[in-house]
Image (cartoon, rainbow, N blue to C red):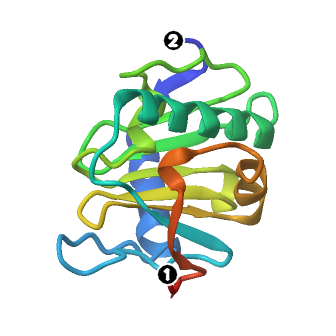
């Protein structure tokens, strides 16, 4: 796949160190959110039930946003906790389909799913047990604002603070 590569050592450890240190990532099945939600950020509750079409639409919206936010050659990390992780250049990459490495870092399907933009300026953290997706960084929030993402309709936190229903 053009524009994609598997993270190898020592880069993989360096990227995960930035997640643990920079985002204060602390994985847990019972303590949530599991990391320090940056400012600005919005954390959305994921519905208990969704269709494959819903998830494909989520991927399409984020792919559009990531392409808007990156320059040619600039890479984004797709991290799947406890699994193989990837780096990709959205400007050069193939349009993702289900099972594509892009999907590993976005939707929490049993493990934490993390996407990191250049310099940790923006990204996402999907929490599999809380069933949430935190979107952080002003550039990404702005890029997603005009895009319809039905799975992200219910806000539960903003800037780490609980949003009242």
Mark 1 or mark 2: name the one nearer the start of the chain: 2
The residue at 68%/50% (across/down) is 118
Q: Which mark is residue 1?
A: 2
Residue 8 shows in this picture: no
Up the image or down, 119 lies above or below 146; here it is: below
Count the numbered circles shown: 2
Tell me residue 133's x, y (percent): 45, 59
The residue at 60%/15% (across/down) is 94
* Element at label 2: loop
Quarter residue 136 falls in: bottom right
Q: Residue furthest front?
A: 165
Q: Which mark is residue 148?
A: none
Q: In the rendered image, which residue does mark 1 sit on?
A: 165
Quarter residue 20 falls in: bottom left
Up the image or down, 161 lies above or below 5; here it is: below
Tell me residue 81's x, y (percent): 29, 51
Pointer 1 local density, CA inside 10 Å: few below 14, some 14–19, many at least 20: few
Tell me residue 156's x, y (percent): 47, 75
Pointer 2 local density, CA inside 10 Å: few below 14, some 14–19, many at least 20: few
**1 and 2 marks in contact (CB < 8 Å):** no
* Element at label 1: loop
The residue at 68%/39% (across/down) is 66
Quick one: 10 or 35, which is closer to the camera?
35
Q: Is residue 116 left or right of residue 30?
A: right
Tell me residue 147's x, y (percent): 71, 43
Quick one: 73 or 78, which is closer to the camera?
78
> Distance between the Cα atoms at labels 1 and 2?
43 Å
The residue at 61%/40% (across/down) is 62
Up the image or down, 150 lies above or below 5; here it is: below
Q: Nearer the viewer, mark 1 or mark 2?
A: 1
Residue 25 shows in this picture: yes
């Amino acid at each position: 796949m053009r524009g994609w590569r598997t993270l190898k050592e020592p880069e993989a450890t360096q990227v995960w160190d930035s997640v643990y240190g920079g985002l204060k990532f602390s994985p847990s099945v019972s303590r949530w959110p599991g990391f320090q939600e940056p400012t600005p950020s919005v954390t959305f509750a994921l519905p208990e039930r969704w269709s494959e079409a819903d998830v494909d639409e989520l991927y399409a919206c984020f792919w559009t946003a990531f392409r808007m936010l990156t320059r040619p050659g600039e890479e984004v990390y797709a991290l799947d906790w406890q699994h193989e992780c990837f780096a990709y250049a959205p400007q050069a990459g193939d349009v993702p389909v289900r099972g594509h490495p892009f999907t590993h870092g976005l939707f929490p399907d049993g493990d934490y799913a993390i996407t990191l933009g250049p310099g940790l300026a923006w990204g996402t953290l999907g929490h599999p047990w809380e069933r949430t997706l935190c979107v952080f960084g002003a550039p990404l929030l702005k890029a997603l604002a005009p895009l319809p993402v039905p799975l992200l309709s219910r806000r539960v936190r903003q800037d780490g603070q609980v949003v009242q229903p």
